Each structure stands twice: as structure tokens, then as C-alpha cells.
Amino acid sequence: VLCVTESWILPGESSVFNELVPAGCAFINVPRAAKRGGGLAAIYKANLKIRQLQPWTANTSFELCLFELGHPQPLLCAVVYRPPRYNKDFLQEFSEFLASCAARYDQMLLLGDFNIHVCCAGKPMVSDFINLMNSFSFTQWVNGPTQECGHTLDLVLSLGCSVSNLRINDAVFSDHRPILFDTTVCSSLATPVVPTRYGRPMNTDTAGRFSLLFGQAALDLSDWSSLDGL
């Protein structure tokens, strides 16, 4: 699964994904409703059991893309983008969102660009944000710079699932670096492939219809008197 923040895809322009998404993949697109910028997306293999969700809390201080992964005990994935400008409502709104998630799911992944300098304890909101995540028993896995200025802004937070092999790659076309990791989900992830079966319907009319077709075929033969005529 590839999660994207700041896609800058406008409402009604999702056709760009149809051109870029590889064969055998599907996508979720959550554009910013007003103003330019922002926007979230998830691109995934089409055989994965993924179901998009609508947020159940009203959020004005951050953007959110929600989906379930797996069945029957799904992992909740939340892709988050918090704009860099300070908003006094963020911690309260995010706390309410986490509380609502904790009441519904035992496994959660929170991913995205939080624009909170967790690497700098003295920065505004950092200690309050970390305390909030600790109060819900989330583990924060990113321990290196994720932005070209050397700060840790993009986070991977988990609850009830393991994260391993996390690495921060070099930036290519963005000032943020891609973060790759593995996770283990206690659920079935892929939709099983149902084998194709072929058959012929049999009922009380089958014998009569076969005899009729066989008789018509016999009448079409031009000559029964020699092998050459067959």
C-alpha cells in the first residue's frame, strides 16, 4: 500500500490516477474540498481487502483518509495531513478522533505528515502531542529526519500491530522523504481467487433436445451409401 499526502489533486480530477496507477492496482482519493494544495491518496493492489471509510468525527484542523485493511479483524489505516499553520483545535480534535477509533478497532496505523517537529522537544505542541499518543498507547517508529531541513515531520504510529524494517529513503521529487516499512496484520489480507468452473445444465428436457439435434444433423448428411459421402 502506498500512502500519499499533499497530492494536490483537485475534486473531480481523479482521472489522473487512472493514467498513473499500475495495472492490477486500485486507489482511494480524498482531495481537499476547498483551496488548492493538500489532498490524500492511497494506492494498493486490487486483490487486497480494503474498504474506504468516511470520518466519523468532524475535523477542521487536519485532513484524513481512512480505510480498513483485512478481514474479519481489520487494521484501521489513517492517512493524516496537518497543515503547518498552528491551529489551537488540533490536539482536541485529534484526541476525539483517537478515542473514537479506540472504541472500534484493536489494530491501528496512523501515517502521514503531521508537521510537528517531534525531534525538537522544545517546539510548540511537541510534548502535548507525544503525551497524547502515549496516553492511547501508540508507538512512534520514525527516528530520523524526514524533511530536507533535517526535521522529523512524517510519522508512523501503530497500536496492536508490529512495524519492522522501517527505512527513510532519499527524497526524489519532494522535500519530504519516503518512508518504507513492513507490518504484520492478524487478518486475511487478500481476496481468495475463485477457480473457474465449467458445466452443462442437465434437466428433464436434456435427453429430448439432444435427440432432436442429433436427428437434424443426420438429415443434413448428403449420402449414406459410401464412406466418401460421410
Image (cartoon, rainbow, N blue to C red):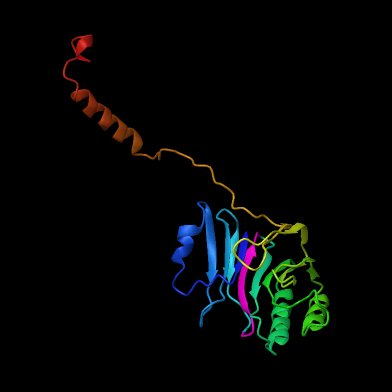
Q: Is 166 covered by the magenta stretch?
A: no
Circle count? 0
Image location of residue 212, percent across then percent down: 26, 32
Above-or-below relation of 115 to 209: below
Q: Looking at this rendering, what residue extends furthest in the front direction?
A: 149
Between 124 and 92, the residue placed more toward the observer is 124
Considering the image in quadrants, where does the N terminus appear? bottom right
**For this view, does 223 lie left or right of residue 58?**
left
Picture residue at 44% right of the left edge, 73% below the top: 12
Image location of residue 185, percent across then percent down: 72, 58
Specify the quadrant of the image occupied by residue 59. bottom right
The range drawn in magenta is 60-71
Specify the quadrant of the image occupied by residue 53. bottom right
Q: Looking at this rendering, what residue extends furthest in the left direction?
A: 222
Picture residue at 49% right of the left edge, 58% below the top: 20
Above-or-below relation of 146 to 210: below
Image location of residue 44, percent across then percent down: 58, 58
Q: Is 62 covered by the magenta stretch?
A: yes
Above-or-below relation of 219 to 65: above
**For this view, does 194 lie left or right of residue 217?**
right
Image location of residue 230, percent across then percent down: 23, 15
Picture residue at 52% right of the left edge, 53% below the top: 22
Q: Looking at this rendering, what residue extends furthest in the top direction?
A: 226
